[in-house]
Amino acid sequence: MEALRPSDYGLVMRRLALLCLALVCPGLLSAHPEWKEANCLGVIDERGALTLTIKFDVPSFLVGQTSKDATIPALDELMRTPGRLDAAIEPGRRRLLDGLRLEVDGRETPVILVAFPSAEAIAATSARQGEADRYPVMLNARLTASIPTKATRLRLSFPPALGTVFVNLRKGMEYQVVMAATPAMPAELTLGESPDDSAAATAWKLFLDGFGHVLPDGWDHCLFMVAMFLGASTVGQALRRSLVFTLGHSVTLTAVAMGWLGQPGPWIEPFIALTIGVGGWLAFRGRGQESSALLLPAVFGLVHGLGFAAAVADNLASWSAGDIILILIGFNLGVEAAQALVIGVAATGLWAVRRVRLPEAGIRQALSLAVALIGFGVFLWRLLGLG
């Protein structure tokens, strides 16, 4: 292929430049000579009433374009075609109201459109600006909403046809935000800290904490439940021991929460492991099946309650006296539910052993001895760790 001569190269470049001008000039000639971004002022008064005043290029919005993108021919057609502007007002009102979304603490809140520019006001404003500056026509729309007194966060989204909206949201002199909101980034105003959780919500969280303290975090606690089950003659007896154990640790946990006992230190952990070892050993020796054996889970529960108190020490500091009972109920119900699940799984395992005709008594003893050895071993390990 023959190479271009310098003169040919210059001719090609001139033709490309003319082509670019031919493509760009129609857009330049038809676009807005001057365009302006919309702006919004939002004010919340002392009664919680929010007033939104939005100033925007109304003709551009009525043709469904941003002020930047609307073309003069499209705007002239709207403004100069008889009856066209009047017919566009009601759809424009609906578009503004449907496209504006107000969320208060994550919940959508109704907004009332109080005022929208009339066709007469739009035409008169454009005429006053003169023929050369007939666009944009910046006029106000006003909306209201009711904000709950305990609201903490306000989020405001605008119709896409408004484009970027410069927003000033404020409540008195204490809370204010100034930002440029876009369709992808709504305006947000923080009115205060999130309210404290209710007692019921806190109790539910503590239920989950109690359950999680056993499953999956409390492997040593699970071993103790297995020891209680292996030493019981029936599943019902094992569940009663679990309940007595829960009542026992409720006593010490309540005492710590009420301030009757000091916060337990790391010294409690070795003794928790010791209860596991003793429980496994008694199950191995077959000494835990008498009704008097309920005393042992109660005593061991007192020790474990101190361990629970250490685990939730950060929460204890923030509990009020009125919430302590409800919170303790939630935590202990979570613990008891997890303990019942552990016993149920262990019972299912032994049921499977019986179904395949394996020696259940021998397996019980082997498991009990394993639990005892693990408990005593962890006791020594933790005891040496204290030093």
Image (cartoon, grey):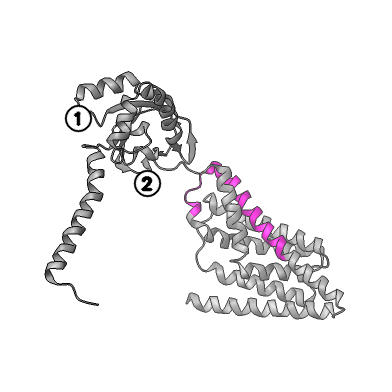
The local secondary structure at tag 2 comes to loop
Give left or right: position of 161 versus 127.
right
Q: How many marks?
A: 2
Q: Nearer the viewer, residue 53 or 285?
A: 53
Judge the density around disc 1: few (<14), some (14-19), many (≥20) Cα neighbours within 10 Å.
some
Q: Is residue 316 magenta?
A: yes
Q: Which label's residue is closer to the chain start, 1 or 2? A: 1
Three-letter amino acid code of the residue under disc 2: Met
Give the Cα separation between the discs numbered 1 and 2.
32 Å
Q: Is residue 334 magenta?
A: yes
Q: Quadrant of residue 125?
A: top left
**Of the numbered discs in the image, which one, if any, rests on residue 133?**
1
Q: Quadrant of residue 64?
A: top left
Is residue 60 visible in the rendered image? The answer is: yes
Q: Is residue 369 placed above or below 90 in the rendered structure?
A: below
Give left or right: position of 34 versus 185.
left
Q: Quadrant of residue 42?
A: top left
**Magenta stretch?**
315-342
Q: Looking at the image, which residue sits at the far left?
A: 7
Q: Looking at the image, which residue is at 50% across and 68% down?
A: 266
Q: Looking at the image, which residue is at 62% across and 63% down?
A: 214
Q: Nearer the viewer, mark 1 or mark 2?
A: 1
Q: Position of residue 61 (x, y in %)?
A: 35, 33
Three-letter amino acid code of the residue under disc 1: Asp
Give left or right: position of 261 versus 84.
right
Q: Looking at the image, which residue is at 82% across and 66% down?
A: 290
Judge the density around disc 2: few (<14), some (14-19), many (≥20) Cα neighbours within 10 Å.
some
